[in-house]
Amino acid sequence: MKPITRMTAAIPHAAFALFATLLAVQLAAAPAREAPGARVAPKPVAPIAITHEFGSDPMVGLPLDLTISIAAEGDLTGISVTFTVDDPLAMIEPPGTVALGALAAGMQSDLAVTVLPLVDQTHYIGVTVTATVDGVMQTRSVSVPIRMSGAAERKSENPPVGQKAEEHLRSFEAIETIR
């Protein structure tokens, strides 16, 4: 067996010191990383604001008037507004698409809309505004909910006082196979 001398014992320490020096030099030369998400831009949104206001409370079988306001947050040209309704809701006025022309930044245009709710449930009117902004076609869409009085009421989990809760049992046929 050879005796360990000072020189052979110093080699591992020298190798570690060399490795640490190389690592420090490489870390100092590496470009700093940015925090994740620092370069993520928010989703672009068309400079069009859409709001609505009801003329009265919605009732089944009675025409409902509402005002749809289109506000320009930038200069808009070639504006068209398209209305769509779900199936049990009837669109009375205006049918289809309305052309508004142009709006300057900060301007607003109001459209009168009349619908006829035919069923006691929540209905939706789709409002889609398409306009040209700086030579590029852009679109903004919203759904306007029309909540009928009966649609807001929910069935209670507990039966009314004096009534018994009923249980319903459903049975499905099972087929066993032996493998």
Image: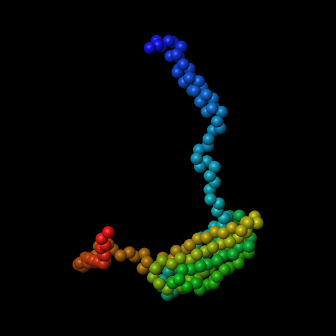
Q: Nearer the viewer, residue 36 or 149?
A: 36
The residue located at (53%, 13%) in the rendering is 7
Could you tell me if residue 26 is visible in this image?
yes
In the picture as drawn, the residue positioned furthest to the front comes out as 1
- Total numbered labels: 0
In the displayed structure image, the side of residue 150 where residue 50 appears, left or right: right
Q: Please say if 36 is above or below 77.
A: above
Q: Please say if 31 is above or below 158.
A: above
In the picture as drawn, the residue positioned furthest to the bottom comes out as 61
The residue located at (64%, 62%) in the rendering is 45
The residue located at (64%, 69%) in the rendering is 140
| Quadrant hosting residue 25 | top right
Q: Nearer the viewer, residue 40 or 111?
A: 40
> Residue 88 placed where, x, y %?
51, 84
> Residue 93 placed where, x, y %?
61, 84
Q: Quadrant of the C terminus?
A: bottom left
Q: Nearer the viewer, residue 91 or 174?
A: 174
Q: Quadrant of the N terminus?
A: top left
Q: Please say if 4 is above or below 18.
A: above
In the displayed structure image, the side of residue 152 where residue 15 appears, left or right: right
The residue located at (52%, 74%) in the rendering is 145
| Quadrant hosting residue 85 | bottom right
